Image (cartoon, rainbow, N blue to C red):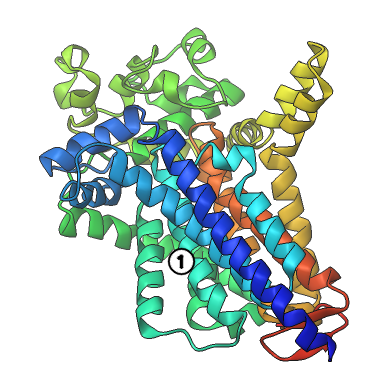
């Protein structure tokens, strides 16, 4: 009896075991954390879903989807189920796809990725970042399952994947930076043969998609425009003034003092400057038109967000960047460092506080900076390894790395707050790509059921 025949029962058994394990853990995930954890953002979006009146402070597609879920049941439960099912469906399909091509260890490791604490505990939080991540993951996984077996993707599956991809692209304003590599993988994976060209093309295509998303939000979903980009503009102007010492960037009729900037600005995020922050006067003076300056102090946070915008703010923003480019760079790098080294910096503090070594190591392992570095190294390896990149596994890993790095790196320019959830998709994409690529690079003496041949260099599918 040949080695391929002997391996078939083991592959079938492992595939069934993985499918059952993923389904069981998903059920436990649902039972323990039901109906999920909501916060101010999700509560606001659910209120919009109930009223069916949307605004664009958060992309309204999530509130719109929630309004449809309410046809099934009220409350957080349906959205929570959507997130958990998408999460485990995505990881489960990838694991099954790996198992069916003989990479059993990688398939088990993929379930381990899904159980990674920082990912598993985030999938129960009802926020757009998680919704985006699980939608993109499920869309990718459905295509991956067919591509690893060299099977044609049915039209219904392709349509479902595209809908999930579209939702993921619309549920975060910056999600477009993650979508282009996934779309290429779905419709024409040959484009991944030139990864640097695809990465270069992704940037202008992603920027072109931003106004298209705005048109959809305002003309299809009819969302009220609150100009959320003002948060980025105010944050950047405050950071430029902080690092340059130039208070004139705020415009002569909107004076600020060094003490005000020094006490209110922090590179960690913009919340102090927000309508709900302790330094709300930044928003009142910069974001709102002078036509309503006499009443702006009396408005609550939501009302002041909807007040007439200051039409001069975009010009002030661009002028400040042009006048002080080095200060702008220091501000943006300071913010990005706060976002990606949170775990590392916490680990340092914990070490000095004599915390257990396991806690220090966990903080280091979960630091986004580590995973961005791993992703960058993986991209260099996959982009230069033609023999790996030409396989289905190489294409899949390269797709995820390009998507995760593009999305995560975009925060260097557009981020305004510091939380791990903002990099939820980046961590999933790079972690998953690492497992897929290692199984492709390091696989030895494995069996490909899909092609019916023994592989000696891991380049099976």
Give the x, y percent position of residue 204.
Answer: 49, 66
Q: Which residue is mark 1?
A: 139
Quarter-of-image position of residue 329: top right
Quarter-of-image position of residue 161: bottom left
In the structure shown, which secondary structural element does the residue marked by tag 1 occupy? helix
Visible residue check, residue 160: yes
Visible residue check, residue 173: no
Give the x, y percent position of residue 46.
Answer: 23, 37
Residue 226 position (above or below residue 135): above
Q: How many marks?
A: 1
Q: Please give the name of the residue rendered at 18% of the width and 25% of the height, measured from the top-left corner.
A: 303
Give the x, y percent position of residue 71.
Answer: 15, 50
Residue 200 position (above or below residue 335): below
Q: Please give the name of the residue rendered at 49% of the width and 77% of the height, measured from the top-left corner.
A: 186
Give the x, y percent position of residue 282.
Answer: 37, 20
Quarter of the figure with the C terminus: bottom right
Quarter of the figure with the N terminus: bottom right
Find the residue positioned furthest to the top: 259
Residue 72 position (above or below residue 151): above
Q: Please give the name of the residue rendered at 26% of the width and 38% of the height, measured from the top-left corner.
A: 45
Quarter-of-image position of residue 429: bottom right
Q: Please give the name of the residue rendered at 41% of the width and 65% of the height, measured from the top-left corner.
A: 165
């Amino acid at each position: 009896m040949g080695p391929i025949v002997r391996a078939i029962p083991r592959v079938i058994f492992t595939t069934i075991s993985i499918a059952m394990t993923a389904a069981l853990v998903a059920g436990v995930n649902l039972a323990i954390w039901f109906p999920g954890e909501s916060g101010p953002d999700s509560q606001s979006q659910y209120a919009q879903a109930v009223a069916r009146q949307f605004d664009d402070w958060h992309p309204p597609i999530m509130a719109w989807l929630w309004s449809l879920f309410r046809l099934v049941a009220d409350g957080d439960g349906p959205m929570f189920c959507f997130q958990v099912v998408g999460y485990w469906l995505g990881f489960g399909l990838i694991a099954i796809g790996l198992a069916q091509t003989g990479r059993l260890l990688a398939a088990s490791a993929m379930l381990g990725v899904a159980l990674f604490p920082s990912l598993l505990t985030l999938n129960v939080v009802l926020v757009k970042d998680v919704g985006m991540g699980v939608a993109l993951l499920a869309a990718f996984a459905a295509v991956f399952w067919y591509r690893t077996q060299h099977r044609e993707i049915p039209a219904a599956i392709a349509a479902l994947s595209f809908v999930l991809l579209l939702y993921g692209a619309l549920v975060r304003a910056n999600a477009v930076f993650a979508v282009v590599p996934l779309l290429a993988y779905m419709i024409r994976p040959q484009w991944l043969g030139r990864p640097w060209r695809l990465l270069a093309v992704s940037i202008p295509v992603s920027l072109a998609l931003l106004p298209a998303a705005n048109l959809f939000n305002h003309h299809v979903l009819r969302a009220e425009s609150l100009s959320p980009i003002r948060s980025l503009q105010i944050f950047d102007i405050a950071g430029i003034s902080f690092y340059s010492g130039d208070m004139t960037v705020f415009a002569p009729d909107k004076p600020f003092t060094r003490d005000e900037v020094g006490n209110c600005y922090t590179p960690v995020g913009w919340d102090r400057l927000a309508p709900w922050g302790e330094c709300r006067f930044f928003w009142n003076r910069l974001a709102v038109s002078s036509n309503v300056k006499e009443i702006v102090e009396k408005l609550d946070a939501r009302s002041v967000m909807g007040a007439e915008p200051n039409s001069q703010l975009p010009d002030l923003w661009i002028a400040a960047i042009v006048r002080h480019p080095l200060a702008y760079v220091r501000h943006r790098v300071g913010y990005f460092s706060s976002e990606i080294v949170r775990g590392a910096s916490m680990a340092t503090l914990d070490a000095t506080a004599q915390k257990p070594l396991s806690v220090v190591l966990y903080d280091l392992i979960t630091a986004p900076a580590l995973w961005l570095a791993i992703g960058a190294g993986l991209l260099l390896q996959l982009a230069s390894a033609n023999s790996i990149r030409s396989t289905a596994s190489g294409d899949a890993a390269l797709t995820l790395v390009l998507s995760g790095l593009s999305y995560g790196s975009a925060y260097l320019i557009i981020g305004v707050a510091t939380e791990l959830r903002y990099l939820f998709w980046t961590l999933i994409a790079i972690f998953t790509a690492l497992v897929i690529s290692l199984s492709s690079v390091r696989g030895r003496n494995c069996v490909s059921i899909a092609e019916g041949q023994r592989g000696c260099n891991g380049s099976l599918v």
